[in-house]
Image (cartoon, helix red, strand yellow):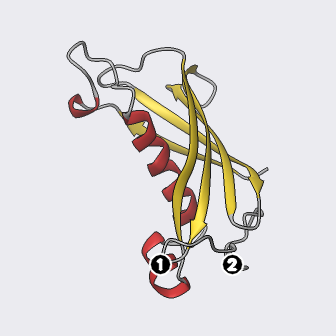
Amino acid sequence: MLQHLFSIRIYYEDTDLSGVVYHSNYLKFFERARTEMLRERGYELSDLFLKHNMQFVVYSAELEYLRPARLDQLLCIVTKVTEVRSASIRYNQSAYLGLENGILSCRANIRLACLDRDQHPRKLPNILSMEKK
């Protein structure tokens, strides 16, 4: 199973009045982690769109909020590819307070669909192998 680690610091703009990460911001953190996972494998989202006529959209997202993350804390986002279908990819993502084996703050099950420029389903191209490199 392909796995990626990404760290992010919690800034004031990420929090609510009480200094706790606002719930929808986890979606942004998870998006950044998935993007960096692709980038580290040699794929830029803009190139996939312009050169390969493909883009990813969130098809479904299920999140569980377990412990609050707060201002100035460091989150470690663990991203795992759990399923690759012909036109979609499923990820399990977890946000830990501190290190990878820290306290679990939030976890998500996110499925992305692959679309072409005209927003039609598109098969994942062979160039985008989700196998370990």
Residue hosting label 1: 117
**Percent position (x, y) of residue 80?**
68, 45
* Viewer-nearest residue: 53 or 73: 53
**Would you call the spot at circle 2 few (<14 residues within 10 Å), some (14-19), or many (20 or more)?**
some
Q: Look at label 2 and name its amino acid.
A: Pro
Asked whether the beta carbons under mark 2 and mark 1 sit within 8 Å of each other, the answer is no
Residue 64 occupies quadrant: top right
Q: Residue at x 54, y 16 (%)?
A: 66
Q: Which mark is residue 8?
A: none
Q: Is residue 6 left or right of residue 87?
A: left
Q: Nearer the viewer, mark 2 or mark 1?
A: 1
Q: Secondary structure at mark 2?
A: loop
Q: Is residue 73 left or right of residue 78?
A: left
Residue hosting label 2: 125
Q: Is residue 72 above or below residue 19?
A: below
Nearer-N-terminus badge (2/1) = 1
Q: Secondary structure at mark 1?
A: loop
Q: Look at label 1 and name its amino acid.
A: Arg
Q: Residue at x 57, y 57 (%)?
A: 37
Q: Residue at x 49, y 43 (%)?
A: 30
* Viewer-nearest residue: 43 or 120: 120
* Viewer-nearest residue: 132 or 60: 60
**Would you call the spot at circle 1 few (<14 residues within 10 Å), some (14-19), or many (20 or more)?**
few
